[in-house]
Amino acid sequence: MVSPMLDINAPGNKLTYNQLSLNFPIDAAVLTWRELHDWFRSIASPEGFGERNRLTAQQNANNTKKYGKYYSDATLTVLSSLNNPILRVQFINVFPVSLSDIQFDTRLSSDDVVSCDATFQYDYFNFVPLD
């Protein structure tokens, strides 16, 4: 029985993916976190157009893609327990949507690894064959 009160599920031509969430260690010089932070700043430009122009020029020097200076492709490599690649996933048209704070804690020992979380939006992904 068909009713106008009932949504009918049907296959379509539009895919919807969840966001890509990553947790990564922060190096001693905080370079990885700062690069992501600069990517955010180039998108939002909280201090105005001067900052946006500077960061955009810096990003354009590293980006040869035609589809936009705020996007990038990203490849995630999953490693085995012996640090051998077992899976590669390429994410297309990635951009950051969140970056966690760095937890500065003087109670941590030098053996503790400080990490943070980053979340990205992307259009789609492909499984890439291992070389």
Image: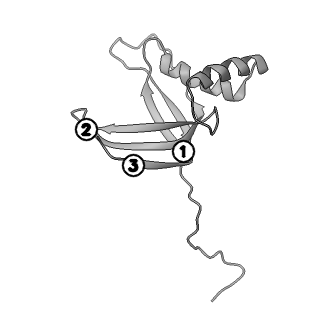
Q: What residue would you read off at disc 3?
A: 127
Nearest to N terminus: mark 3 or mark 2: 2
Residue 30 visible at all: yes
Q: Considering only order in the chain, which callout, 1 or 2, is on the residue closer to the N terminus?
A: 1
Q: Residue at x 38, y 20 (%)?
A: 113
Instruction: Report the Cα–Cα distance between label 2 and label 1.
Output: 24 Å
Quadrant of the snapshot with the N terminus = bottom right
Q: Residue at x 64, y 32 (%)?
A: 69
Find numbered disc 2 in the image and state the secondary structure of the residue it sits on.
loop
**Mark 3 neighbour class, 10 Å CA radius: few under 14, some 14 to 19, many 20 or more:** few
| Identity, as a three-letter code, of the amino acid under mark 1 | Gln
Residue type of the residue flagged with mark 2: Ser
Q: Quadrant of residue 5?
A: bottom right
Q: Name the spot of residue 46 as percent of width and height, x first.
A: 74, 22
Regarding residue 48, the answer to whether it shows in the image is no
Residue that label 1 marks: 19
- Sequence-wise, the earlier of marks 3 and 1 is 1
Q: Are marks 3 and 2 in contact (CB under 8 Å)?
A: no
